[in-house]
Image (tube, coloured by chain):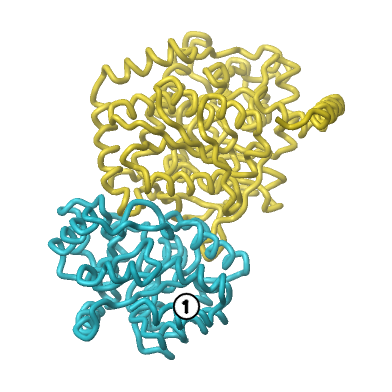
Chain colours: A cyan, B yellow
Amino acid sequence: MTLAQEIKQARQDREILLMTHLVLGYPSFEVNREVIARMVEAGVDIIELQIPFSEPVADGPVILRANQEAIDRGVKVRQCLEFAAEMTDRHRIPFLFMTYYNILFKYGVEAFLQKSKESGIRGLIIPDLPPEEGEEYLTACRRLELAPIQIFAPTSTEARMKKLAGHGGGFIYCVARRGVTGTQTSFDQDFDRYIDRCRRATEFPLAVGFGISNRRDVDLLRGKADIAVIGSATIRLVEAQGAAAVSEFIAGLR
Amino acid sequence: MKPGYYGNWGGAFVPEILHETFRQLNAVFAEAQADPSFWQQYVDLMASYSCRPTPLTLAENLTRRFGGAQIYIKREDLNHTGAHKANNVMGQGLLVRRMGKTRVIAETGAGQHGVATATMAAKFGLACTIYMGEEDVQRQRPNVFWMEKLGATVVPVTSGSRTLKDAINEAFRDWVANMDSTHYVMGTVCGPHPFPAMVAWFQKIIGEETRRQILAAHGRLPARVYACVGGGSNAMGIFQGFMADEEVELVGVEAGGKGLTTGQHAARLTAEEAGNHPAGTPGVAQGYKTMFLQDSDGQMKDTHSVAAGLDYIGVSPMLADLWEGGRVRMAAATDAEVMEALQLTMASEGIIPALESAHAFVQAFREAGELPPEAAIVINQSGRGDKDIFTIAHAFKDPSWQAFIRAKGEEYAKEPAS
């Protein structure tokens, strides 16, 4: 079953799915392990594993600092791939990689994707790789049956959305607003119109991310999005209260 | 070839949120290029506001000292705000007017591009925010003072290595939130397409003038043209005037820092020894593909140079291509060599090059003696050094300057902070 089919099937039982995010090796792989176990247990549907990069331009201060500290602590791409293999082996839910293009480019795009596939990864989110620059990536993803998840933004025109969807796989990641990760989003009428435009442009399930941090935000997405993405909020939580706090937080989101 | 590519290098690795912004920028830039009155407006503005054309000075004493080629210096230091950065900034300012945006942002390393952008914003009535690595804020304090006095907000960037690359990331983060009102005035021939093409287009004014001036002064083309290379905007500016003249050798000079074997440098293309690989390797970051100083995982490394404006991980995709194709030769100058060349130029010619520009002088001085007196060489003095007084005085360990700063510190310590 493709990732898109699997998401659509899961949506028949649940009004909204939850996707969470963490930065690999931050604060440590050990803490990552515990956080992931708690997330899965609490009913998270998809997990996005971010491989740290020194220049994470699309990320706000929380994830930026996590990237930087992970690299300072010596986290290597090879360890991230090994860790992903361990997680996909242990847990049944789909895992994705999120990172920046240079990590793939430097490893060798084909080789990286091959290794991701072998590690049980289902798809990738690469925010600095538009389809115009991603020919090699998109071709290899299709061949390996990995979902090259495409991103919509409020500034995307309908023609652009259709073009992006044509290259996509799994679901569409809809950036809720202008700006970087980790600050509040207001889910107003403009947002509703934007989601309507996204729906009209694609058959893929829609994930909404950027600034979703509590149950109220998730509730506002019910009936609009298929997947709510919680990013910076769990990193902040683990920093402040430790991995154990994740169970209650996730359970309280839906 | 795809638009925005120079051989293997360049491109536009831009997040989706900026796709429309770049579409608009490409359209406005194409319109301006197709409109001869736009270029004339730019040239007129630079003449009335920024002392263009800048002179080409024959350095007679240096020429005599090295006993070889006639040494000419292109005086970009005489631009308003003291560097070639003004060319690009005023040009982009005219584009901002066409787009109807009301705010500009910029990254700055040495502070020259920040000061130039703040100046343009003041003249054109635009709001202005400058991102500057915290380390650069410390070492270029006078420029911070001027940017603030010109009405700009200066934001010290505390992430990463706290230098130019981190300031670029932070400027992008601002832009993805505010692109409706804001234009990002990229300071160099790097970043996603169309920035390299746009900045090179405005900077070509240097090369066009230089070609005319050297033919008038010397009667023939120069044998070699030297320019320092951080991102590469002054180099691309002057090189474009001679690109079609195959007999003119184009030489780019990178920051050798404490030496190419120390790892503390910003030389991406210059190998330690001929035949060796350079320290830079192909990568994609900050929106474009070029040779970056990075580790085997693709994480960017810390760089070092006495000159903040050269202290950068990447290099223009245009220069990477010209280097790869053999059209541009790359060399490096160490911090120590730069201080020597600076001292010699000041004492011989009464000219104070910026620390960045002094890198080009080092390589020219190494080679001038190899060439016959009928030959001429041109050094692009991209900026003036007197604005670097704190850095230069510190690098010279000048005792009377240190005593002055101590006394000034004591004087301020006695006054209650206001």
| Image vertical order of residue B136 relative to residue A77, above or below | above
Q: Mark 1 points at which residue?
A: A81
Vertical arrangement, residue B50 with respect to residue A118, above or below: above
Question: Residue B195, percent across and down?
Answer: 38, 38
| Residue at the image point whose x is 29% and y is 69% from the top | A148
Residue B222 located left or right of residue A49 = right
Residue drawn where x is 56% and y is 16% of the image: B78
Q: Answer yes or no: is residue B61 visible.
A: yes
Percent from the top left, x then y, of residue B145?
Answer: 62, 28
Q: Which amino acid does label 1 sit on?
A: Leu
Give the x, y percent position of residue A112: 41, 72
Whether residue B398 is visible to the viewer of this picture, yes or no, is no
Q: How crowded is mark 1: few (under 14 residues within 10 Å), some or many (20 or more)?
A: many
Q: What element carries label 1?
A: helix
Q: Mark 1 lies on which chain?
A: A
| Residue situated in front as seen by the camera: B244 or A159 | A159
Residue at x-position 41% and y-position 79%: A250
Q: Percent from the top left, x then y, of residue B388?
A: 67, 28
Picture quadrant where residue B82 is located = top right
Going by the image, does B223 lie left or right of B262? Answer: left
Front-most of A202 and B356? Answer: A202
